[in-house]
Image (cartoon, helix red, strand yellow):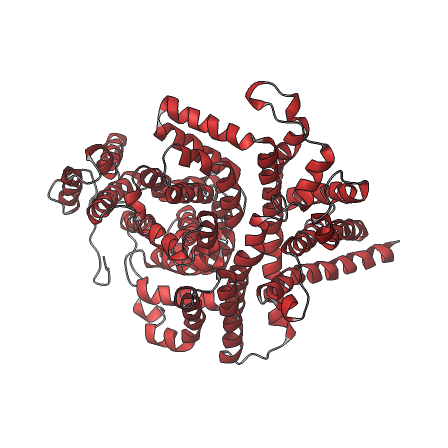
């Protein structure tokens, strides 16, 4: 019996590797249009059904019932593949046959949907699964409800087939974007990680920022930004760059919980930073049906302000704790670093050229960049081109895609439920009612809380996909610009990574830093405070996302940057130098809010909005002695 069990465990391990590698391989074939080139025409929904089937099967092997996957998981995985494969095989026939659906159609649908949702629970946790189950159940029971919650009666078999095979259900737009656009960027991130590009970006950041006050912490901010905008995974970014930057910060004197929080906030912000934004920029462009360049232009100003606030707080922490820069002798040289890793920049250049110069589809461009990254990484490092590096890239990308595909498949269930029952109008009306009764700001706050709650523990792209379906319509109905509405829910979905009690990024960084999870989570909230304010500001004043006149954009940027400086001072953690009293913090926080919102109460094109910013400038220059930020004597090597 033990031998049989051991055989099952080994078989499950092999099958898990095969399934996770198959996801990117099939995706690459689709992106390169290989089926058509080989003379086979495949309906997109059939391709998507195959992808979600493989992801569901892989989920049971990666997240087994017991400690290790065995025969039971193999059987369940086979059933999942068969159930979704049945739909893929028959999809074209079902397209032209209407009327009642026989059991041979909705029977496999029941099995496929149940296993997909159970796979979602195993991969992503209970909270998002309960949300999906609630939406999935509503078409079956909604006609029993009264009042606004009443839904039209729909035959159960039609509901099942709508979820299972309709392009407004699981094999629809959301899963399609994940299986093409996002897949290309996840492969690019996996390729960069496999060939050592993350180390190159860290060395470049160390060479640029290492000598300055709190150098290792500023290195963390720069390197995490550079890698995070490509990787598409906050947690993956923390694990990749944090293993280098967190020990550096701790050795330089940064307290463990601050070191972990700095890494978490910087890694999270990488996905807000153009031009790539962890592939989510392309999702937003798909939903809004606007050029990709429009998303980049809109996201640029908030991203710069996000990192400005973080840099200011890091500098204040360094000054408070008496930290200095690293010795030049201990740092990599810029020239030597570029000579050793210049080729890592070529795939990024190719990506940008294909996107902006050639106008290629995002997934295809990312795929070519990933291929070039692998080839250059192997050749320039003189590694043998064997199966190992390629298999590692495929399985790493496949594991990430497994979770993402399950969530996007579940999002298809949510979309199908909204379409069948009209409950989307109910959600929109409820949020709009809050806005009409209590004002737009109150509605934005409620929407932000919902976004943070629903986004907890979910991958970045999936957070955006789910929230854009549920929350954006209400924001647009209340007069928020569509671009601002999409960026609003994207920001707050990402902030779930920093918000206790499920602050995944902060807790991952805390494990690397060996610091307390709650202390790290609270420090992350403080360091990421600007990101909580920014979305509300650009939802109220679209000039912050480059939608307005030159004067409006200039005034918005100046006032928010000035307010950000005061916010950083107000939230600075007390240490050897900064011992600010609570009343002073409260006054600085109030001044920060007044300054940052000046264009809202003075007018988006009124020069009166500059008055608080001018006061901030005077304060920053030290002409008004407010607060107790003392200076300490520095050695000759200290740099500001």
- The residue shown at (35%, 30%) is 441
The number of numbered badges drawn on the structure is 0
Q: Is residue 330 left or right of residue 31?
A: left
User: Which sits in the foreground, 203 or 410?
Assistant: 410
**In the drawing, does residue 282 fall left or right of residue 105?**
left
- Where is residue 470 drawn, in percent x and y? 51, 37
Outermost residue, top side: 146
Q: Quadrant of residue 436?
A: top left
Closer to us: 465 or 70: 465
Q: Nearer the viewer, residue 208 or 609?
A: 609
Question: Is there any visible trace of residue 444 in the rendered image?
Answer: yes
The residue lying furthest to the left in this view is 623
In the figure, 328 relative to 475: above or below? below
Residue 432, percent across and down?
A: 43, 28
In the image, is residue 392 above or below residue 488? below
Residue 69 in view of the camera:
no
Q: Which one is in front, 412 or 624?
A: 412
Q: Residue furthest right?
A: 1
Apparent side of residue 288 relative to residue 628 in the rendered image (left or right): right
The C terminus is located in which quarter? bottom left
Identified at 44% across, 57% down, the residue is: 228
User: Residue at (42%, 74%) from the top-left corner?
Assistant: 341
Q: Identify the residue at image location x=57%, y=18%.
A: 147
Q: Position of residue 234 (x, y in %)?
A: 48, 52
Q: Where does the image place residue 90, in percent across and percent down from the top left?
A: 74, 52
């Amino acid at each position: 019996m033990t031998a049989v069990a051991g055989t099952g465990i080994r078989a499950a391990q092999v099958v898990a590797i095969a399934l996770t590698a198959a996801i990117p391989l099939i995706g690459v074939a689709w992106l390169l249009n290989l089926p058509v080139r080989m003379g086979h025409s495949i309906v997109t929904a059939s391709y998507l059904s195959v992808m979600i089937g493989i992801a569901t099967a892989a989920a049971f092997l990666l997240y087994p019932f017991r400690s290790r996957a065995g025969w039971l998981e193999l059987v369940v995985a086979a059933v999942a593949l068969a159930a979704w494969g049945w739909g893929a095989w028959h999809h074209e026939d079902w397209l032209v046959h209407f009327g009642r659906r026989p059991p041979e159609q909705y029977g496999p649908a029941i099995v496929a949907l149940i296993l997909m949702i159970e796979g979602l629970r195993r991969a992503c946790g209970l909270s998002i699964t309960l949300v999906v189950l609630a939406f999935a159940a509503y078409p079956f029971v909604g006609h029993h409800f009264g009042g606004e919650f009443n839904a039209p009666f729909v035959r159960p078999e039609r509901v099942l087939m709508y979820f299972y095979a309709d392009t407004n259900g699981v094999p629809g737009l959301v899963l399609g974007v994940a299986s093409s656009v996002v897949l290309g960027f996840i492969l690019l991130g996996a390729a960069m990680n496999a060939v050592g590009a993350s180390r190159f970006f860290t060395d470049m950041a160390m060479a640029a920022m290492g000598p300055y006050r709190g150098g290792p912490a500023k290195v963390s901010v720069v390197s995490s930004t550079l890698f995070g905008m490509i990787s598409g995974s906050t947690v993956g970014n923390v694990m990749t760059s944090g293993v280098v930057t967190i020990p550096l910060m701790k050795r330089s004197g940064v307290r463990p919980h601050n070191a972990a929080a700095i890494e978490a906030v910087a890694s999270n912000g990488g996905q807000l930073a153009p031009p790539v934004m962890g592939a989510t920029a392309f999702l937003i462009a798909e939903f809004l049906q606007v050029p990709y360049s429009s998303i980049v232009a809109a996201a640029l100003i908030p991203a710069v302000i996000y990192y400005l606030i973080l840099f200011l707080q890091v500098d204040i922490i360094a000054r408070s704790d008496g930290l200095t820069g690293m010795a030049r002798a201990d740092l990599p040289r810029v020239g030597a670093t570029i000579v050793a890793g210049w080729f890592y920049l070529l795939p990024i250049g190719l990506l940008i050229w294909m996107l902006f110069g050639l106008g290629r589809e995002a997934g295809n461009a990312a795929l070519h960049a990933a291929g070039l990254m692998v080839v250059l990484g192997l050749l320039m490092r003189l590694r043998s081109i064997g199966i190992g590096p390629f298999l590692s890239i495929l399985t790493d990308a496949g594991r990430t895609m497994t979770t993402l595909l399950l969530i996007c498949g579940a999002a298809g269930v949510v979309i199908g439920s909204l379409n069948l029952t009209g409950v989307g109008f109910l959600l929109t009306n409820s949020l709009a009612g809050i806005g009409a009764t209590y004002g737009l700001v109150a509605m934005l706050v409620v929407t932000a809380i919902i976004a943070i709650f629903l986004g907890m523990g979910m991958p970045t792209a999936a957070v955006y996909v789910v929230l854009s379906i549920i929350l954006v319509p209400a924001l647009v109905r209340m007069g928020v610009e569509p671009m601002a509405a999409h960026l609003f829910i994207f920001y707050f979905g990402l902030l779930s990574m920093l918000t206790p009690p499920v602050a995944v990024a902060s807790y991952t960084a805390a494990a690397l830093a060996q610091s307390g999870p709650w202390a790290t989570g609270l420090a992350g909230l403080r360091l990421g405070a600007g990101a909580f304010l920014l979305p509300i500001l650009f939802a109220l004043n679209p000039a912050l996302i480059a939608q307005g006149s030159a004067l409006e954009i200039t005034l918005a940027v100046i006032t928010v940057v000035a307010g950000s400086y005061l916010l950083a001072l107000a939230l600075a953690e007390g240490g050897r130098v900064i011992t600010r009293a609570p009343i002073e913090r409260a006054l600085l926080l109030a001044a920060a809010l007044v300054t940052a919102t000046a264009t809202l109460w003075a007018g988006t094109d009124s020069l009166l909005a500059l008055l608080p910013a001018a006061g901030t400038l005077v304060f920053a220059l030290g002409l008004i002695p407010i607060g107790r930020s003392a200076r300490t004597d520095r050695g000759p090597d200290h740099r500001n």
